[in-house]
Amino acid sequence: MMSVSRNLAIAAVAAASLAGSTACMSAEAASGETPAVPVRSLPEIRGEERAVLTSAPDVPPPITRDYATRVVVELETVEKVMRLADGVDYTFWTFGGTVPGQFIRVREGDLVEFHLTNSRHSMVPHNIDLHAVTGPGGGAAATLTIPGGESVFTFRAINPGLYVYHCAVSPVPMHIGNGMYGMILVEPAEGLPKVDREFYVMQSEFYARPGENGGAHTLDMERGAAEQPTHVVFNGAVGALTGANALEANVGESIRLFVGNGGPNLVSSFHVIGEIFDHVYGEGGTMISQRNVQTTLIPAGGSAIVEFRAEKAGDLVLVDHSIFRAFNKGALGTITVTGDDNPELFAQLKGLPMAGH
Amino acid sequence: MYRFAPLAGAALLLAHATPVALESSGPAPLAAVAGSAASPPALPDSGTVSLAEPEAAAFATMVRIPATRYRPLYASPGTEIVVAPFRLDRDPVTRGQYLAFVRANPRWRRDRVDTRAADAGYLAEWRTSDDAGTATDLRRPVTGVSRTAAEAYCAVRGTRLPSLSEWEAVAAASAVARDATGDPEFVQTLLSRYAHRTDPVPPVERGTRNAYGIRGMHDLVWEWVAAPHIDHAAHSHETGTEHGAYCASAAVGASNAANYPAFLRFAVRSGLTDRSTMGTLGFRCAA
């Protein structure tokens, strides 16, 4: 009798101490109830809307609502042959038929309902991993979609920031290497400061090898593993942002670039010739991490937001400052700034005439 | 309906007869079937099958595959599975052959198929439930068929679907070597072949012949294999890791991270159920 009641007393003390321990899983054993796990409180969802998606270099307009809503996003994966460079057609795998895929813009706290379809003409299944997603595979676990199929999942955009999305079906380097990436911006609840122009730029590289019998180029696995690309480009092709495709702005306008790096391998040393970044949101986060920056790093599978004001008329040239990539492999883009000259800011006193003036 | 009766009889006889097994070289005699009232069937590689003789296409050339070793993609490096000798169709099953099967077994018509056996894409490319297209179309690999349908077709011939190990062991062959998985050029060209498959798929005669004498393993269509539980020897390896299909960690536990074509094939299989159909997915039979 004594030992039984003593054992009971010991058990009672043990149970009490367990119940009193805040981090302890075995409170479940003692009380039979599921222990409380701290969860963030999510804002209430009001209404529903269809996401406005844009193709690079355009960006959907800033969000004006001040509440969280259900946003329906529909993307289709499409495999198609397009021009990568002059004389080089490539069998791209894409979100929505473009490289990069379309830009998605939502607000912190939104409930995103994501519909992924895979064209029935595709050869392989696809899925999507959005870096904005907290959840299995960033969505990839829920979206494996065979040609002709559809997958739907929902996620809460709990972290603001500028995020890459990409396909994550095995072999992942091939899906990314063939062009399956894009960006999603989760605006902070208070929004971003207003600017005059916003552009969507995504750097990536290609490892292109001619197809059999003169067919379109496909992925060169050996070059990919050796990290030796044949092409490094902005927005999916050599010349996508030059010549007739150059971005445009006016003197005096504030410009924000949402810059992503789809990789698959290279880190970008992003620089705009003739300009200095007044603000850099390093790695696509929500804080201005540095001011007055010449060249900022953009990780593979990452992003950066840069802001500056156009103050001189002329061409600003976007480059990866690992400069062989710009000169030899295509990592070049242009912003053509139009407006009155400002000789106080810059003037040539002697020398050969400046090109283009 | 007398033209169909001999075929039905042929189907019954085939179910009991052993399919002809052939060496990989030389032309292919066909299994003659007693009681057939049709004229002697045309050789499959004669290049033409008229609309009047889809029954002839019911006979298939099979090739004897000797014992081979297969290195599963999801296994510790150096793991090898011995694949016992078996027979494999030289070509994927054609539309003409499948049309003959549908005519002899009307419950497999597109307008009568059980939805548990095949999804809405079943035989979607055929003109009607009974019309699979021109003479050239009949020579193309049949697609839009589910695993359940493929198994039923093979069973009528007294055959079965190849196991994953059997199919992958034969797929390792290039034109000149039986195991070319160590040849980076060959592995790279498969990516090009997969990317440049045409729509519509060419007739099976245009399939590239490999060192076993099997045609079109890589340049025509994806192909069904038996459900994983059938291949006991390779069962633990066939399904891959939990993340195999969708995650960058697919290479974890893989025996050869450079074999992208194998990863592509595994990813395709991971998305399929027994009733799935795709316009790029056909099959061939084994015994």
Image (cartoon, helix red, strand yellow):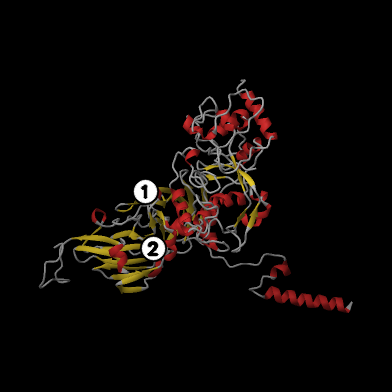
Estimate the x, y position of residue A40 in percent, counting from the top left: 54, 65
Judging by the rendered image, the residue that carries numbered circle 2 is: A261
Q: Quadrant of residue A26?
A: bottom right
* Residue B111 in view in this figure: no
Q: Residues within 10 Å of mark 2 (few under 14, many from 20)?
A: many
Asked if disc 2 and disc 1 are in contact, CB closer than 8 Å, the reply is no
* Residue A327 in view in this figure: yes
Q: Mark 2 belongs to which amino acid? A: Asn
Residue at 68% from the left image edge and 37% from the top image edge: B18
Q: Quadrant of residue B148?
A: top right
Q: Quadrant of the N terminus of chain A?
A: bottom right
> In the image, are marks 2 and 1 on the same chain?
yes
Element class at badge 2: strand
Of the two numbered discs 2 and 1 on the same chain, state the one appearing first in sequence: 1
Q: Nearer the viewer, residue B98 or A133?
A: B98
Is A92 left or right of B113, judged from the image as shown? left
Chain of the residue under label 2: A
Is B113 left or right of A183, judged from the image as shown? right
Q: Is residue B52 above or below residue A103?
A: above
Judging by the rendered image, the residue that carries numbered circle 1 is: A214
Q: Nearer the viewer, residue A34 or B232?
A: B232
Q: Quadrant of the C terminus of chain A?
A: bottom left
Q: Mark 1 belongs to which amino acid? A: Gly
Q: Nearer the viewer, residue A293 or B190?
A: B190
